[in-house]
Structures are given as C-alpha cells and as structure tokens.
Image: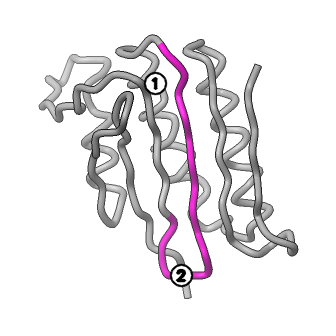
Amino acid sequence: MVGVSDSTGTLAHTPGFAEWSFPADAAAVRTARTLVRDTLREWGLESVTDVTVLLVSELVTNSLRYASGPIGVRMYSHAGPTLLVEVSDPLPDPPRERVADADDEGGRGLQLVALASRRWGTRPGNTGKTVWFELSLPG
C-alpha cells in the first residue's frame, strides 16, 4: 500500500508539493516513477520529467537495496527556478559514490544524480537520511 499526500495547490498546473511513502518492496520503484511522472505532467513540468523519473528511480532502488523500512519521496516546486526532489529511508549511513568498472551492472546511480542535477547532497534525519537533488526549471 502506498501512502499518498498531495497538496499541489488549486490549479492543476501550479507547481507545489507532493509526498509519498512506499514500503521497502520492489514495486516501489515502478510506483514512484508513475507518481512522479503524473505529478510533473499535472504541474506542467514535462521538460524535466524524464530526468526526474530516472534519478528518483535510481535513488529509490538504492534505498531498496540497503534499507529495510519505508521509503519517502518528496517533490517541491513553488514557482521558483528549481525542482527539489528528496528520497528518504531509515538507514542512517549516507550513500557513497563509487567508480563502477566497465563490466559492473550497478554503482552508477549517484554518478547519474551528480551529473544530471544542478546540485545534490545528503542530510541526516531523525530516523535515517535523505538524499536530495535540484533540477533547473525552464523559464
């Protein structure tokens, strides 16, 4: 079951705030991608949809791989020049960037986040951590 709280404002295309909580289950990645894509379309932010969906997918996958509790995804865009996306999980250890060998099937998620985003980082929470990234919005 996915908990959904969405307060995007009164206009469908007014950027705002969305938040979801997913169980640590493989279906969370697909559900997160769908909800992020649908919300960005509703907000009129189609230009950043593909990259946002890709980065959220990478971060939720990382959370699933290492954490055993709920995974949170939040998006903020209050008519500013950026979209802020956060992925939280109960594991307190910050993620570590690593250099993947050419034959490695994984290990590139944080590199993707670093290369595709305007800024990114991590911060500790009361019960875990949050990995966040910002994307520049057009206009």
Image check: 136 left or right of 31? left
Which residue in the protein does label 1 denote? Answer: 61
Occupied quadrant, residue 62 = top left
**Mark 2 falls on what kind of element?**
loop
Looking at the rendered structure, which numbered label has been put on residue 80? 2
**Mark 1 falls on what kind of element?**
helix
> In front: mark 1 or mark 2?
2
Q: Amino acid at mark 1?
A: Thr
Q: Quadrant of the C terminus?
A: bottom right
Mark 1: give few (<14), some (14-19) or many (20+) Cα within 10 Å. many
Count of numbered circles on the image: 2
Q: What segment carries the magenta color?
A: 69-83
Image check: 107 left or right of 48? left
Mark closest to the chain's N terminus, 1 or 2 = 1
Q: Nearer the viewer, residue 50 or 74?
A: 74
Q: Amino acid at mark 2?
A: Gly
Q: Nearer the viewer, residue 51 or 80?
A: 80
Occupied quadrant, residue 127 = top left
Q: Residue at x 12, y 31 (%)?
A: 99
Up/down of 29 relative to 46, above or below? above
Q: Residue at x 40, y 16 (%)?
A: 67
Q: Is residue 73 magenta?
A: yes
Q: CA distance from mark 1 to mark 2?
A: 28 Å
